[in-house]
């Protein structure tokens, strides 16, 4: 599995200032609808529900919000780079400026975990993150993400 199987160009955006995590999830819901036809409210509710279990801010300015939703047939990714860092209640208490969101079918099981591991490995790559932070063009962001070769777990 690679990120080009999860991410399409229309699901990559650069966003201005987000005022809250809730507002970010609303925006991710809108992107899910525009790029994949997923009901924005369903995506928003799923992300909020998952976040209530514990923060998905993994540190170093990165968040990996994710949810399992009824009615999906495949795992899809959404990526946003924020112009202004957002307080996200991350594990390192630092604001985030990169968010890679995964939406998966309710019964996706191990495939959801594999996709999450792939995204996590990719976003842990400091070189990839530096390139993402240095670009404002969604097409370039998409290329950086889909060309990145995540180091394989030992």
Image (cartoon, grey):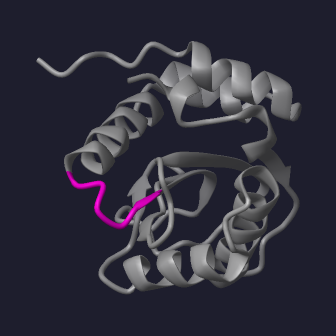
Q: Is residue 118 magenta?
A: no
Quadrant into which the C terminus falls:
top left
Q: Which residue is found at the position 83% from the left and 34% from the top?
A: 138
Q: Which residue is found at the position 88% from the left and 31% from the top?
A: 137
Range drawn in magenta: 104-109
Residue 72 x %, y %: 50, 60
Compared with 54, 134 (above or below) is above
Compared with 104, 98 (above or below) is above
- Characterize the magenta stretch by its predominant secondary structure: loop
Residue nearest the observer in this picture, 152 or 82: 152
Residue 91 x %, y %: 35, 65
Number of numbered discs: 0
Q: Which residue is found at the position 71% from the left and 19% from the top?
A: 143
Q: Is residue 16 visible?
A: yes
Residue nearest the observer in this picture, 22 or 92: 22
Q: Is residue 12 visible?
A: no
Locate residue 27 relative to residue 102 in the image: left or right: right
Quadrant into which the N terminus falls:
top left
Q: Is residue 105 magenta?
A: yes
Q: As drawn, which residue projects farthest toward the left? A: 154
Residue 132 x %, y %: 68, 31
Residue 61 x %, y %: 54, 51
Quadrant housing residue 105: bottom left
Locate residue 131 relative to residue 109 in the image: left or right: right
Compared with 35, 57 (above or below) is below
Quadrant housing residue 150: top left
Residue nearest the observer in this picture, 93 or 136: 136
Locate residue 116 relative to residue 131 in the image: left or right: left
Q: Which residue is found at the position 32% from the left and 49% from the top?
A: 112
Quadrant housing residue 27: bottom right
């Amino acid at each position: 599995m690679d990120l080009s199987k999860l991410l399409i160009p229309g699901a990559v955006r650069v966003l201005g200032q987000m005022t809250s995590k809730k507002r970010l999830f609303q925006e991710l819901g809108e992107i899910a609808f525009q790029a994949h036809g997923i009901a924005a409210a369903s995506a928003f509710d799923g992300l909020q529900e998952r976040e209530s279990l514990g923060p998905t801010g993994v540190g170093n300015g990165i968040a990996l919000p994710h949810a399992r939703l009824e009615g999906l047939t495949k795992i899809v990714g959404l990526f946003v780079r924020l112009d202004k860092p957002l307080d996200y209640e991350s594990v390192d208490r630092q604001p985030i400026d990169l968010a890679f969101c995964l939406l998966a079918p309710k019964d996706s099981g191990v495939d959801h975990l594999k996709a999450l591991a792939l995204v996590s490995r990719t976003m842990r790559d400091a070189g990839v993150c530096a390139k993402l932070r240095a670009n404002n063009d969604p097409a370039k962001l998409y290329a950086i993400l889909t060309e990145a070769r995540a180091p394989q777990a030992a």
